[in-house]
């Protein structure tokens, strides 16, 4: 089960106190940025993994967003259901559950005075975690039971959270500040800083103790575009290593397995094999005339479906 005990300490509070005024201004600005999102839609695309590799079938792409506005941050919770953040006509952001088999949508949250972003399934399978923007603009991790019970606050005094990624029962947290920081709460007393200036994509490498993130301190120019190092932090040894370079101009990635990951640029999806140290290989391009710029990608646990986020062409 998730450890929902409060994480607090006198030392941690004293360290934060000095930066209180600065952080307050920063997370107010960040809250406004969260709400000022571009219009995006979700597309479902069939895929397949076998002994010969990973294949995407771009001709199967179909739009699954029903309305206009912001549908983004998709994340599978099982092979036939996913959650995502959606903006309603009033400008409020809620978490929506989508069933691929029935094509049905269900509100996981319906909170007129609150906004929820970055939904993910917890390791125990009992909660959908989110970054919740509260009435006072606080940004913290909240857990929403999948049985639609009352939500519970996790890490009550670690904020403002912009993004996060789970490693077992513990979430690595992107804390908004100057600079932004990636931290890992080992205990109530020990909030370990992994890195400064991380990217927004934070993900456990399958089958390992590693949390992988983009290091934005290490910008590299590739074909006229900025690329960054992919760093892996081992939560056991507390050591960090470089495992590759991002696709130039992009920062969001998703794992297929321990060694292979996907990134996208414009309408094209690329694959990289970390263990072989190969470059980015183009594996599929979507023929979506009215849409462009794949930003986020989610992969189903059985590797049979991708859900991607795209922007309308203007």
Image (cartoon, helix red, strand yellow):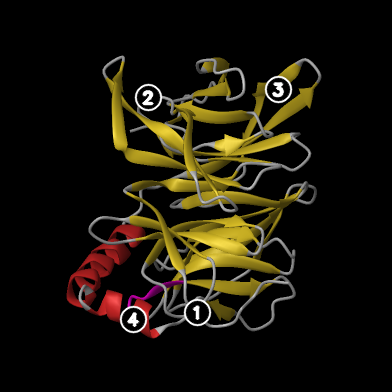
Q: Which residue is mark 2?
A: 248
Along the line of sight, the residue nearer the viewer: 55 or 155 = 155
Counting residues from the start of the chain, the first of labels 1 and 3 encountered is: 1
Disc 2 crowd, CA 10 A, few/some/many (<14, 14-19, 20+): many
Name the disc covering residue 7, or none. Answer: 1
Name the disc covering residue 21, or none. Answer: none
Disc 4 crowd, CA 10 A, few/some/many (<14, 14-19, 20+): few
Counting residues from the start of the chain, the first of labels 4 and 1 encountered is: 1
Tell how many labels.
4
- At 33% from the left edge and 75% from the top edge, which residue is drawn? 137
Q: Which residue is mark 4?
A: 13
Distance between the Cα atoms at labels 4 and 1? 11 Å
Q: Which residues are magenta?
A: 136-140
Q: Which residue is mark 3?
A: 54
> As displayed, is residue 283 above or below residue 77?
above
Residue 172 point in image, percent of width and height:
51, 58
């Amino acid at each position: 089960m998730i450890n929902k005990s409060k994480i607090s300490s006198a030392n941690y509070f004293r360290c934060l106190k000095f930066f209180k005024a600065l952080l307050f201004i920063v997370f107010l600005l960040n809250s406004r940025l969260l709400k000022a999102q571009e219009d995006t839609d979700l597309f479902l695309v069939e895929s397949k993994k076998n002994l010969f590799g990973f294949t995407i079938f771009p001709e199967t792409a179909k739009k699954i967003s029903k309305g206009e506005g912001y549908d983004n941050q998709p994340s599978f919770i099982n092979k036939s259901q996913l959650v995502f953040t959606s903006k309603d006509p009033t400008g409020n952001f809620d978490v929506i559950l989508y069933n691929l088999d029935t094509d049905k949508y269900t509100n996981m949250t319906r909170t007129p005075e609150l906004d929820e972003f970055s939904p993910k399934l917890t390791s125990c399978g009992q909660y959908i975690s989110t970054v919740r923007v509260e009435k006072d603009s606080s940004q913290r991790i909240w857990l929403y039971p999948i049985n639609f019970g009352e939500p519970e606050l996790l890490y009550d005094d670690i904020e403002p959270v912009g993004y996060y990624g789970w490693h077992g029962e513990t979430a690595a947290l992107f804390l908004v500040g100057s600079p932004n920081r990636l931290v890992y709460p080992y205990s109530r007393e020990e909030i370990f800083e992994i890195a400064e200036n991380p990217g927004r994509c934070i993900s456990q490498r399958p089958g390992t103790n590693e949390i992988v993130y983009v290091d934005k301190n290490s910008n590299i120019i590739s074909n006229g575009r900025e690329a960054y190092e992919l760093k892996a932090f081992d939560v056991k040894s507390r050591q960090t290593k470089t495992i590759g370079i991002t696709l130039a101009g992009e920062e969001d990635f998703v794992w297929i397995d321990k060694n292979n990951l996907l990134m996208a640029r414009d309408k094209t999806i690329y694959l990289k094999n970390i263990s072989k140290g190969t470059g980015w290989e183009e594996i599929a391009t979507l023929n979506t005339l009215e849409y462009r710029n794949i930003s986020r990608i989610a992969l189903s646990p059985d590797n049979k479906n991708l859900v991607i986020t795209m922007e309308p062409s203007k």
